[in-house]
Amino acid sequence: MKPTRFMTLNRHILEGEKMHPEATGELSALLSQLSMAAKVISLEVNKAGLVDILGFTGDSNVHGEQVKKLDMFAHEILIRAMDHGGHFCVMASEEEEDIIRIPQKHKIGKYVLLFDPLDGSSNIDANVSIGTIFSILKRVTPDGKPGTIEDCLQEGYKQVAAGYVLYGSSTMLVYTTGHGVYGFTLDPAFGEFLLSHDNIQIPENGRIYSINEGNYLYWHNGLKKYIKYLQSNTYDDKPYQARYIGSMVADVHRTLLYGGIFMYPADKRNPNGKLRLMYECNPMSFLIESAGGRAIDGKRRILEIVPKDLHQRTPIYLGSKKCVDLIESYLKEDEENKGGN
């Protein structure tokens, strides 16, 4: 067994803190709190069919989507786990229209938490891998006062930490503070996240592409040409492979480890894309870039988009650098051809 198997998440966080003498320990503490919430959610996900938390609640969320029972369970667990520690000034969730204020009885901190409590929840009843995505920022309003929406609406490059928890055949927590990407697998025998993927680097290129090809009819020409290129060419003398799970956490996790590209583009029906900038695209882009990859909306770096709305959507193309470079060239050529007509 590798020595890294005995590196727990908490120990890893604390050792990382020692490398920064100016650190106060707050970021370490809140990451530890997040891992505890992840354990609780993982436990319920693994027995969801036995405890009547599958199916819909009968309500709709801010996006007009039907709310799953497990969605709301994860949403509430994260709020209860994180609102009392004194680390946050405000939170926001994909499941809630407005910001989530810290109760007055609790200390107000200097960090901001944005989260998608259960990404891929449409797959819950089919027992497909789902996950929790989180993004942490430093507040921009004065310390000591309740946070505002201004604290939440910051560009992605200002994140101080981001990550996701994947609930699959095993539960994994993957996170970055901008200096390397690290993966921890939950050992159910003694309930600890143990380092299983040290300093993850995404391959520079890859042969796996991940996109919902059922939307082909509505795509723009540049993307259609790129997909046709992949379908008619090879990589290392092997055909390109289409792999699409439909759960962003699962698709991006595979892309991070194996290389390739994940795409959720704009199309004629959804000119702004469908994935949420603050809860999904920013944290995933921060992870991918920290592992050596790229993430764009087709024209610009995702992490440089100035957010205007808490639930803003964006197209996204992320993954291996060379893969993203190639799709970017196809999209740019398409735009230039339009401009010339």
Image: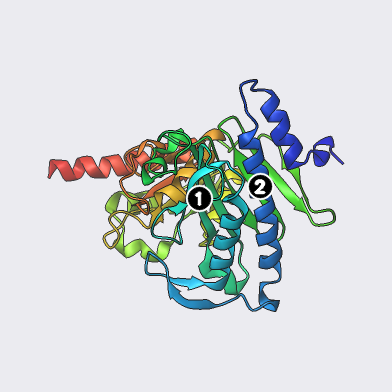
At a point 63% along the width and 28% down the height, the residue shown is 24
* Residue 302 in picture, x, y percent from top left: 39, 40
Task: Kindly identify which numbered label has been placed on residue 102.
Answer: 1
Secondary structure at badge 2 equals: helix
- Let me know if residue 242 appears in the view: no
Per the image, the residue denoted by label 2 is: 33
| Kind of residue sitting beneath label 1 | Ile
Identify the mark nearer the N-term, 1 or 2: 2
Q: Callout 1: 10 Å neighbours few (<14), some, many (20+)? A: many
At a point 48% along the width and 71% down the height, the residue shown is 67
* Residue 124 in picture, x, y percent from top left: 58, 70
Between 121 and 330, which is closer to the camera in this rendering?
121
| Kind of residue sitting beneath label 2 | Gln
* Residue 294 in picture, x, y percent from top left: 46, 37
Query: Quarter holding the N terminus?
Result: top right
Secondary structure at badge 1 equals: loop
